[in-house]
């Protein structure tokens, strides 16, 4: 049974009407790039949240110390170069020609402020688990900042790809809440406006220090209904749509007005279980759920074969992917036996999800779990509510939640640490041994030692099943035929890397 909150249902209806081709008219693609997202951003403060619909927007407003090029290599952005003063200190030399959108120069003080803001436990960033090995950021020269870590940190640069630079003077003057409402960055596009529940508009930064975008303006709209996103593309009311499934992608093939762009990402689809809540505190029930899910059937029957089943919470695109991990196989009879043995038949489990995710998969998994004798109720909420629930205290997190995780860092640390370490707001697991192995893996530059640690974590996940890895996700975009853009594995929508041809 699917439960949908009344306000959310009303919002869906209003958005479907507001985003229909007749209501919006045809987009002037050369002057305005229109992007249809699944949900509106939950935050435009880059330190407050990191989820696809937020990241798609704010990554164009802000610059980071480093970034990835289209080939996936880490390259300079605000930092021009960096060097290791020791195993625990990295010195970054910064550009001296960057200004924020309010005209103020971007300084070393802003860089240090941004790093120290996101690592402050009182700030409570959902990204804290990815940066909490950084002890401090200090200005050590006019255009120099030194980061100190609590030990060797092999994925520091890979994580810094996601850490945006915010202006200290603006944040301190107006406060966090107001900054989220009207963010100021130094990126290729400046914030234009936010019509809550409908769209966020951006304007090109013609004074950008780097490559200036070809589109004078962009609009990111919240369009929860995937069929409406496809219809908008086909009518010319939008130029780019995210979150298409394989069935809708086929509708665009041969349309003449739109095309499908796809890439295999580092994102892992998974089902997260909460071992603090009965009956999931019984390992037999968790294993039953793992045996009940037909990963190959989901990939081939629902996802059109674009994606690839995985047996661990990592993909071949990650450092830390370990060959030979064997997860519980698809075995519905064993699943039913385990549920019966544990005395869990008939017990009700809520299954948290959001429109951002492919509901065909959620419904298929719910049916597979129901077939074991469990009683699963799908709880569909907007993305902001979903995120609030899955990042709450373990005892308040959902029994079961569907997710698709990407760290944009291509390292297993960015997946396993936030989802499994007891210090993370995303984790409902508390296991001292796993905490130790995850800490050891991020505390050494020895790649062999790191792989050994991740092998143990992978084997633990396969045996104890706090989470069920499903598949390495391919992402499918719908694009106007004139849009020139190649999507990348880290799922960034850099507007200044896109072009247009009539």
Image: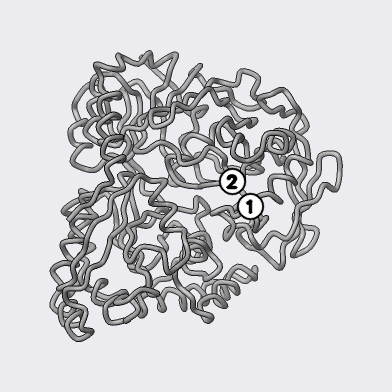
Q: Earlier in the sequence, mark 1 or mark 2?
A: 2
- Which is more foreground, mark 1 or mark 2? 1
Q: Looking at the rendered structure, which numbered label has been put on residue 369?
A: none
Specify the quadrant that holds the N terminus.
bottom left
Total numbered labels placed on residues in the image: 2
Q: Which residue is drawn at 25% across and 72% down?
A: 289
Question: Residues at badges 1 and 2 in contact (C-beta under 8 Å)?
Answer: yes
* Residue occupying image coordinates x 58% and y 58%: 130
Q: Quadrant of residue 152?
A: bottom right
Q: In this view, does 462 lie to the left or right of 441?
A: left
Is 262 left or right of 455, judged from the image as shown?
left
**Residue 22 at x, y percent in the picture:** 24, 16
Q: Residues within 10 Å of mark 2 (few under 14, many from 20)?
A: many
Question: Which residue does the numbered mark 2 point to in the structure image?
Answer: 47
Residue picked out by circle 1: 123
Q: Nearer the viewer, residue 141 or 422?
A: 422
Indicate the position of residue 378 as horizontal and vertical percent values: 24, 56
Q: Where is residue 204 in the image (x, y as percent from the top left)?
A: 55, 20
């Amino acid at each position: 049974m699917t439960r949908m909150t009344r306000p959310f249902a009303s919002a869906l209806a209003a958005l479907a009407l507001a985003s229909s081709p007749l209501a919006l008219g045809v987009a002037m693609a050369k002057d305005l790039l229109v992007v249809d997202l699944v949900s509106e951003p939950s935050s435009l403060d880059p330190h407050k949240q990191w989820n696809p619909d937020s990241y798609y927007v704010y990554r164009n407003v802000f610059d980071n110390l480093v970034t990835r090029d289209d080939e996936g290599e880490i390259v300079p952005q605000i930092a021009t170069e960096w060097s290791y003063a020791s195993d625990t200190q990295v010195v970054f030399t910064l550009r001296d020609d960057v200004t924020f959108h309010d005209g103020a120069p971007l300084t070393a003080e802003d860089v240090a402020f941004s790093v120290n803001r996101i690592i402050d436990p009182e700030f409570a960033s959902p990204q804290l688990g990815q940066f909490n090995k950084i002890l401090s950021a200090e200005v050590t020269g006019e255009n120099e900042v030194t980061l100190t870590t609590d030990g060797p940190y092999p994925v520091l640069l890979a994580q810094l790809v996601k850490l945006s630079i915010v202006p200290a003077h603006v944040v301190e003057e107006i406060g966090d809440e107001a900054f989220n409402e009207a963010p100021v960055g130094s990126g290729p596009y400046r914030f234009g406006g936010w019509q809550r529940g409908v769209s966020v508009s951006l304007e090109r930064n013609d004074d950008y220090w780097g490559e200036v975008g070809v589109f004078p303006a962009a609009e990111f709209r919240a369009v929860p209904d995937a069929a409406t996103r496809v219809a908008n593309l086909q009518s010319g009311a939008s130029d780019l749509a995210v979150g298409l499934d394989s069935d809708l992608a086929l509708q665009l093939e041969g349309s003449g007005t739109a095309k499908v762009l796809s890439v295999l990402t580092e994102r892992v689809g998974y089902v997260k279980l909460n071992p603090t809540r009965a009956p999931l505190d019984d390992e037999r029930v968790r294993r039953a759920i793992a045996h009940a899910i037909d990963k190959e059937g989901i990939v081939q029957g629902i996802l059109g074969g674009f994606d690839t089943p995985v047996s661990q919470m990592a993909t071949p695109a990650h450092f830390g992917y370990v060959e030979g991990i064997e997860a519980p196989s698809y075995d519905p009879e064993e699943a039913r036996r385990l549920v019966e043995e544990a005395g869990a038949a008939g017990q009700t489990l809520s299954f948290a999800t959001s429109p951002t995710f492919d509901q065909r998969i959620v419904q298929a998994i719910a049916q597979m779990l129901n077939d074991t004798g469990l009683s699963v109720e799908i709880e569909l909420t907007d993305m902001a509510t979903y995120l609030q629930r899955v990042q709450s205290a373990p005892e308040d997190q959902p029994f079961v939640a569907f997710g698709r995780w990407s760290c944009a860092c291509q390292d297993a640390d960015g997946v396993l640490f936030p989802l499994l370490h007891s210090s993370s707001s995303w984790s409902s697991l508390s296991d001292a041994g796993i905490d130790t192995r995850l800490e050891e893996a991020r505390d050494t530059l020895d790649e062999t030692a790191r792989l050994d640690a991740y092998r143990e974590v992978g084997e633990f996940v396969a045996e104890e099943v706090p989470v069920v890895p499903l598949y390495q996700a391919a992402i499918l975009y719908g694009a106007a035929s004139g849009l020139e853009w190649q999507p990348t594995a880290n799922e960034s929508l850099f507007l200044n890397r896109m072009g247009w041809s009539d």
